[in-house]
Amino acid sequence: MFRSCAFCNTPFDGDGGPSGLGVGRRIAFDEWKGRLWVVCPRCSRWNLTPFDDRLERIEAVARAAQSGRVAASTDQVALIRWERYDLVRVGKPLRVELATWRYGERLRNRQRERMKVVVPLTVAAIGLGIAANVAAGGGFGVIVWNIHRAVDWVYLRIVGSRKVSLIESPICTHCGSIMQLRARHVQHARIVPDAHADMGVLLSCPRCHQEGAQLTGIEAVQVLRQGLTYLNLARGGRRRAEDAAREVDRVGGPDHLVREIARRELPLRALRPERGLALEMAVDERAEVEELERQWREAEEIAEIADGTLGSSTLVEEELRRLKNRDGDQPSG
Ligand SMILES: [Zn+2]
Ligand SMILES: [Zn+2]
């Protein structure tokens, strides 16, 4: 149970207030990334709360924080007083424009990767085409147009037949075969809720076409990244970063999006195109954010706030002011 500090075993103080956790007087939260911590009254370490209902709890804490008083803040952290609770807001909610920019970067990287394959293919195909055309005495323009389509098709085949890199290939529970997953097979997979992880990915067996294995954690993320890259490429059409960013924003962030899709348990290929792209971006970001979370715990500013020597709130406020002034002295960047 989530009753005492995972680091020092001290029972938490307070009753959790708006979080509904039932414990905690100092509560830290990050709305966009979907994080919620209870700060230990003794060792001041940040205890990440269980994932179940976390999003609803964060919403409730964020609402309370809006009517609270900001005691002190830096660019990244704000200490907010609300009734008898200390609410620590981490990070800034990201704006759609910023997400658009980040997703745009990702799409441009995909495009660069594509050109590495497409350009040599096109050159080779045009060479062949001209030779064939001269022999047949036909028009040049038709050939070039057809080559463009043929090369796109070949590229899609290449991406689709890439092996999904897993540490161990899953075994189908229906037919007992070892699943040799290619990126194109993942479009039949479904994201489903999982009792022990953020989400599960239910795989369709390439041989018997039954749902034969469920992955979680890093493996689920790996499968999704490769599968969605293929799926979104296969659908073609507009691949606009802005649409994906709006889609993520509309549902309230990447974690909400993944949960929403898991709740509906649709195969990936049944997702609307903009939602498919949004999911690809969200999964990529989650992988990044999970890495960041590990780093975040080590981050200096947090360590200073969470430092056991800063036991009293006054000291925390002073520390935050000091950090703010220090930032103010430096050119922004
Ligand atoms: Zn502790
Ligand atoms: Zn099978």
Image: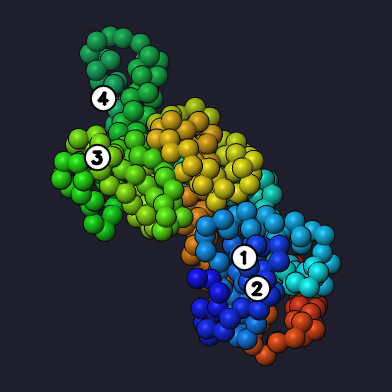
Place residue 310 in its image quadrant: bottom right
Q: Which mark is residue 83?
A: none
- Label 1 residue SS: loop
- Label 4 residue SS: helix
Q: Amino acid at mark 3?
A: Cys
Q: Amino acid at mark 2?
A: Gly
Q: Quick one: label 2, few (<14), some, or many (20+) residues within 10 Å? A: many
Q: CA distance from mark 3 to mark 4?
A: 38 Å
In contact (CB < 8 Å): disc 4 and disc 2: no
**Of the image marks 4 and 2, the number of the one nearer the N terminus:** 2
Residue at 77% x, 82% y is 313
Q: CA distance from mark 4 to mark 2?
A: 71 Å
The residue lying furthest to the bottom in this view is 309
For the C terminus, give its image quadrant.
Answer: bottom right
Q: Is mark 3 within 8 Å of ligand 2?
A: yes
Q: Amino acid at mark 1?
A: Leu
In x, y percent, where is residue 223? 35, 48
**Of the image marks 3 and 1, the number of the one nearer the N terminus:** 1
Q: Nearer the viewer, mark 1 or mark 4?
A: 1
Camera sees residue 184: yes
**Label 3: which residue?**
205
The residue lying furthest to the left in this view is 176
Residue at 23% x, 57% y is 168
In x, y percent, where is residue 159? 33, 39
**Label 1: which residue?**
21
- Label 2 residue SS: loop
**Label 2: which residue?**
24
Left or right, 125 with respect to 191, comes to: left
Q: Quick one: label 4, few (<14), some, or many (20+) residues within 10 Å? A: few
In the depicted view, which residue is nearer to us: 259 or 53? 53
In contact (CB < 8 Å): disc 1 and disc 2: yes
